[in-house]
Amino acid sequence: MKQFLSVRPLVIAMLACGSAGSHAVSFTQNDITLDINGTVNGYYVYRNAETINRATGASTTTNNSALSNGLLPGWINFVVTTQAGGQDIKAHVSFAPGINNNSKVVGLPIGNPTPGSGSPVDPYSQIDTRNLYFQFGNNDWGTLKFGRDIGLFASNIILSDMTLIGVGGTSNASIPYNTTFGMIGHGYMYTGFQPQITYTTPNYNGFQVSAGIFQPSSFAGDENVTPGFQAVANYDFKTDATKGRLWGGLVYQDTSCSQEPCAVKTFSANGFELGLKAAYGNFEGVLYGFTGRGLGLSTVGAQFFNGSDGNGNRTESAGYFVQGTYTYGKTKFGINYGQNRDKNGFLNAVGGGPDDYARNQSTTVGVYHSLNKFITLVGEFNYENITNAQDTNYDNKNKTISLGGIMFF
């Protein structure tokens, strides 16, 4: 059966990032094939967190251990493929559970700790439906996708982040948690899994474009007249010595206010990205950068979260990410660095001035050893330096050591 040329399920891309290959269980009945694959991981995480009062110079340090998922939760995928009427047809359903709960008593069942109290749903334990879509198409006219899948903007960079199969940074997620943040918020924003209708062109000698409409977010108003829009153009290249991908992407959405008085009648957000991944022999390098206006606090990493001050002044964000890895035998060694920076907009609304900014910097050094075709053992050290303009008195420095492994099947 032909391979689809659109954005593949995240787990397949994750498998390509690691040293293990996909070993799906496959069943075929008549002309329909069902593949089942997935991943499970677990890590020991030790974090040293220092909070510094800039006004007095005083600092407070806390140290914690945890057994946690990494950047990935667990994942089980059910993928149906077939052909009919000259179309390659596919459906993908996945569930992503985690290993932690927030019970105060070790070993108690997972659940809301205070049922009926109105307290929020347990943030530590959840089953997330990340993929739920179908698509059809062929190599002549392209592919249409309907449902929920990974977004287009910033998807290439998270799939290129070596900490995808590890832990990375822990500043934006308590530990233990279902997932950490890897380098999200430290060089790029999180693409997310979003409802969408997307079209992907055929592959023209390595060049391919995907574009689509997405479920809009009411980030600065009470109505969304139009859906969100995302697009990415990829160019895959290969020579005798090198291979890689060059890409550029964009995201755009507007929202409006229907109830008077409105501080802002209409509001728009946008972001742009440019990235390059190239391999030469056993070495692979990644370069990436993005900018955004009203797109959200990039230092948190979530799109459309606090993208303005409520009066139409947009948060301005920018970031860059660099990474180098070298594979020797069954072991990959890597180092990456990323920085995101936000200013104005929301930061002004919480007491900042025009020259104040939030900045997240992070460096990860990692070792990834392929024990066998299923299991990769991982060791990482991550250092984060956070300048927090949301609270102008404090900065944070986190050091995280993580040891564990991930299994793909």
Image (tube, grey):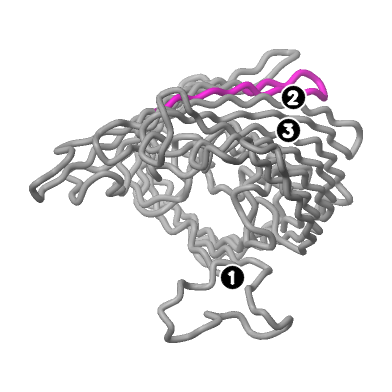
Specify whether 47 is left or right of 305: right
Question: What amino acid type should be assigned to the residue bearing mark 1?
Answer: Ser
- Is-magenta flag for residue 288? yes
Instruction: List x then y, in percent, for residue 308.
Output: 33, 37
Secondary structure of the magenta portion, mostly? strand
Q: Residue at x 41, y 55 (%)?
A: 133
Q: Which residue is farthest right? A: 329
Q: Nearer the viewer, residue 371 or 6?
A: 371
Q: Which residue is farthest top? A: 240
Magenta span of residues:
277-292
Q: Which residue is farthest left? A: 260
Instruction: List x then y, in percent, for residue 370.
Output: 85, 46
Estimate the spatial distance between the alpha carbons at disc 2 and disc 1, rounded to whole Å. 35 Å
Dot 2 corresponds to which residue?
Answer: 284
Dot 1 corresponds to which residue?
Answer: 125
Instruction: List x then y, in percent, for residue 196.
Output: 34, 47
Q: Residues within 10 Å of mark 1 (few under 14, many from 20)?
A: some
Estimate the spatial distance between the alpha carbons at disc 1 and disc 3, rounded to whole Å. 28 Å
